Structures are given as structure tokens and as C-alpha cells.
Amino acid sequence: MARFLSAFLAILVFILWSQGPASAEDPNAWFSRYRNELEELAALSREPGKAEDGLSRAQSFIRRLMAQEAGQGPQCLVYARVLLLKAIFEGELDRWDEAVWDYQVAVNLDPAVADFQFTDYPNLASRFFQARDEQAKIRNAVSSGSELVVLRPEGVSSVPALTFRKAKHVDPEYPVAFRKANLGASVEIHIVIDENGAPGTPVFSGDCAVAPFYVAAAEALRQWRYHPITIEGQKAAVLTKTRTEFSLHPGGDLP
């Protein structure tokens, strides 16, 4: 356990010093408010039979962050680490759809998370590395600037105008602290809609100060389901862009 904490804290220190100030407030001072709880959560991840408890605590941690912080400090760093630990707990519980999604959201919030080696979690490492590599491929596709990319079936001769019909929609929770501060945001997240209509492999980049909006939007997106998409008579997997509007005024648009 001590070896794990040393390695984990070394990563935290490296990220803090490598990122530089994220706001006028000293990021190290801001981060220190949550360091003890992160250390406790990390230690819990190494205790056998504690995954359910750890997952519950990680979820509570995120809810408190949503309620307490509005645009202050290096929020993406803290959210990324809580989501990384949440993903580890989910992996231990064999809840891999959630684990992979949360891990990939964490990598979006702080790309340095992709360097985490899972040395103390050998039973989980290969699945997370596979998710990391898949996300890197999708990020390259996103960088091409295309609004829509057909991933499967391969060799499609032409891409028709597609209509994405949702079978299930979940509204995102508005981060409480931002609601109280009367702040909103527009959040764009690329997702892969697979052959069964399930979203996966989220890709985004944005201002660290509005990280809670990305976390809230991603959590809602994870639960969406689409009717399967068919191209040339075959079920297709496509990469597309979603936009979530967080607004306290009528007319907010959720695609």
C-alpha cells in the first residue's frame, strides 16, 4: 500500500508542477484541499473487498465537487483523479462499460492520466490500456475535422444523411455551484455510437475551469441509447459530435 501511495502521489506532484497555474489562485494550495481525500480513496482501492465502498465514496466526492466549486482552481486535475479511481473500483466490480467510460473521461480532462501504468492493478491494466489506445485512434479521427465518420462497416462507398434517433435520453445534472453562480456553458463531446446504439469512447477538450460541465454532460451521455444505425443494409458504428447546452434560460438545446 505504501508503495502504491508513493507512486500515486508522485504522479500528482508531477501533474501539479507540470501544468502550471490554472487560475490566479495557487493551484497547489487549491489542490491541497482535496489531497487527503484522494489519498484515502487511493488507499481504499488497494484493500480487498472495498470496491463497493470506494465507488460510493468516489461518487459522493464528485457530487460535493459539483456543489462546492464553480470555476476555481485546477478542477480538471481533481475530477480526473477521482474518475480514475472510480474507474478502478468499477473495474474491480466487473462493471467495464462504466469503468472504460470514466477512465476515458479522465484522460480527456487530463491527458497525463493516460500515463498511469496500473502497476498495482495487474488484473485491470490490459482493459484500460486497450481503452486508452482506442481513444487515441478516435481522437485522431476527431482531429481530421469531420462532423461524421463511419467506423464500421469498412469500405462504405458513400455516407447518407443520417438521422440519430434516441431510444433513451437522460438529462445531465446542472452542476449546483454553477447554477448558484448563474453560470452556464456549451459542451461538445465526440462519441462513437456502436452497432447496437450504445455510446462509447468520449473525446473532448475544454477549459479546465468548466470541467464540471464536461463531467455532468459525459455522465448523461453514457446513459443515452440510440436506435441502431444502418448503412447500405448493415448496422454501422459512427463517430459523431454532440452538444449540450447548460443554460438557466429557456431554449437550452440537447441534441
Image: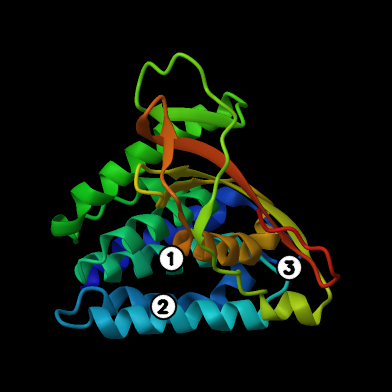
Secondary structure of residue under mark 1: helix
Q: Position of residue 136 (x, y in %)?
A: 41, 35
Q: Position of residue 107 (x, y in %)?
A: 46, 50
Residue type at numbered disc 3: Gly
The numbered dot on residue 58 is 2
Instruction: Tell whether label 1 touches label 2 (CB within 8 Å).
Output: yes
Q: Nearer the viewer, residue 156 or 45?
A: 156
Residue type at numbered disc 1: Leu
Secondary structure of residue under mark 2: helix
Q: Earlier in the sequence, mark 2 or mark 3?
A: 2
Instruction: Tell whether label 3 touches label 1 (CB within 8 Å).
Output: no
Q: Nearer the viewer, residue 249 or 58?
A: 249
Q: Residue at x 65, y 64 (%)?
A: 213
Q: Earlier in the sequence, mark 2 or mark 1?
A: 2
Secondary structure of residue under mark 3: loop
| Mark 2 surroundings: few (<14), some (14-19) or many (≥20) residues within 10 A | many
Q: Position of residue 151 (x, y in %)?
A: 40, 29
Instruction: Tell whether label 3 touches label 2 (CB within 8 Å).
Output: no
The numbered dot on residue 83 is 1
Quadrant containing the N terminus is bottom left
| Mark 1 surroundings: few (<14), some (14-19) or many (≥20) residues within 10 A | many
Q: Earlier in the sequence, mark 1 or mark 3?
A: 3
Judge whether 130 appears above or below 244 on screen. Answer: above
Q: Nearer the viewer, residue 73 or 92?
A: 92
Judge whether 176 appears above or below 161 on screen. Answer: below
The numbered dot on residue 109 is none
Query: Mark 3 — residue?
Result: 71
